[in-house]
Amino acid sequence: MAIVDITVIPVGTGTPSVSEYVVEIQKVLRQYEGKVKYQLTPMSTLIEGDLKLLLEIVHELHEVPFQKGLQRVCTNIRIDDRRDKENTMERKLQSVQAKL
Amino acid sequence: MAIVDITVIPVGTGTPSVSEYVVEIQKVLRQYEGKVKYQLTPMSTLIEGDLKLLLEIVHELHEVPFQKGLQRVCTNIRIDDRRDKENTMERKLQSVQAKL
Amino acid sequence: MAIVDITVIPVGTGTPSVSEYVVEIQKVLRQYEGKVKYQLTPMSTLIEGDLKLLLEIVHELHEVPFQKGLQRVCTNIRIDDRRDKENTMERKLQSVQAKL
Amino acid sequence: MAIVDITVIPVGTGTPSVSEYVVEIQKVLRQYEGKVKYQLTPMSTLIEGDLKLLLEIVHELHEVPFQKGLQRVCTNIRIDDRRDKENTMERKLQSVQAKL
């Protein structure tokens, strides 16, 4: 189980606001409910699931601003992939909070 | 008001677990309560405040694994800085959720 | 044409050196010569080509440390994708250098 | 000696081109010649030097699009900091190339 952390930055918007793109990305993610877990944070979207599927979703999310007419997109992705034990978003948070 | 999203990756740990470093980072952040807002996510730590102070904190957090004896640290930082309107973690989330 | 900038960080190496993993990644990339262009920088590997293929390669490069026995990998990826004009590594550099 | 890898993404430009901002960033860096080493790649700018100074420079580069009138900037930074041996851009590349 891998977790990806993705932020899709539309370039050339003409305005500092990008929330319409973030909203659209959340709508795309709804179609994957049951297949992946996801969570919106103030800085990015976290998605947990099978890495191959996650990278397909990354590609789909990266396309969102192009579909809305933009010509350039800068996407930043972090992958955290741990295979010796269950690596879920919930487990990672609990692991830290238990030690605080 | 800027927001930074930081993940500090200790290199050379000998084990896949890094939660002890994340715990220490949260302890450092507690010393800044009242000066910045911060939030732990499953993938990183988000900190909101004055950018100059945020970058000083970034430096301090980056030092944590060295203080615990490691010799290499890879830190990844995203800064989101918007100046035409209040740019807080809470506001950003609300702005998206209101449109969903 | 998209460009990806990838850095694969093996976690749990027991030593600060990670060059053996970077070397292996370059060997994987050699298999794609003719299909993508790539370039090693002191901080990451840049790869230029069709985005779908690039994301498959990203997945393959991310697997390298697992194949060498590690249990955790943190990979960081930036995608720059511009579609209104030719977006190559060479062109981007020239565009800046012409104005300096 | 640390190395930072920085990309400054101006948001709200109204056009996909951002090379004017990259050019300005290179001009700011020229003022630090002798104090840091830096290198422009097709995807980012790499800077090598004392980490405290590097983070001050990061702040200054992040301000460039604001000085040119924009209201939002998303900056992405990777820090690679190794302290058991000389960690220079040149050394890192050589270390990989020697094994290829």
Image: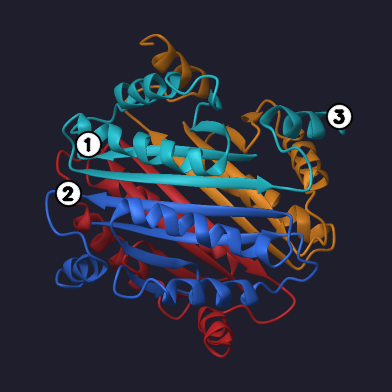
Chain colours: A red, B blue, C orange, D cyan
Instruction: Please tell me which residue lies in front, D42 or A95.
Output: A95
Relative vertical location of residue D65 with respect to residue A34 in this rendering, above or below = above
Mark 1 lies on residue: D66
**Subunit that carries the residue with mark 3:** D
Q: Earlier in the sequence, mark 3 or mark 1?
A: 1
**How dense is the environment of label 2, judged by Cα within 10 Å: few (below 14), some, or many (20 and up)?**
some
* Mark closer to the observer (3, 2): 2
For numbered disc 3, what is the local secondary structure? loop
Relative vertical location of residue A89 with respect to residue A63 in this rendering, above or below = below
**Subunit that carries the residue with mark 2:** B
Q: Are marks 3 and 2 in contact (CB under 8 Å)?
A: no
* Mark closer to the observer (3, 1): 1
The numbered dot on residue A22 is none
- Please report the residue visible at 35 percent of the width from the left and 36 percent of the height from the top: D60
Q: CA distance from mark 3 to mark 2?
A: 47 Å
Q: Residue furthest bottom?
A: A98
Q: Where residue A98 appears, x then y in whole percent?
A: 56, 91
Tell me if A97 is positioned left or right of C8 in this view. Answer: left
Specify the amino acid type for callout 3. Answer: Ala
Instruction: Please tell me which residue lies in front, A55 or A85.
Output: A85
Specify the amino acid type for callout 2. Answer: Arg
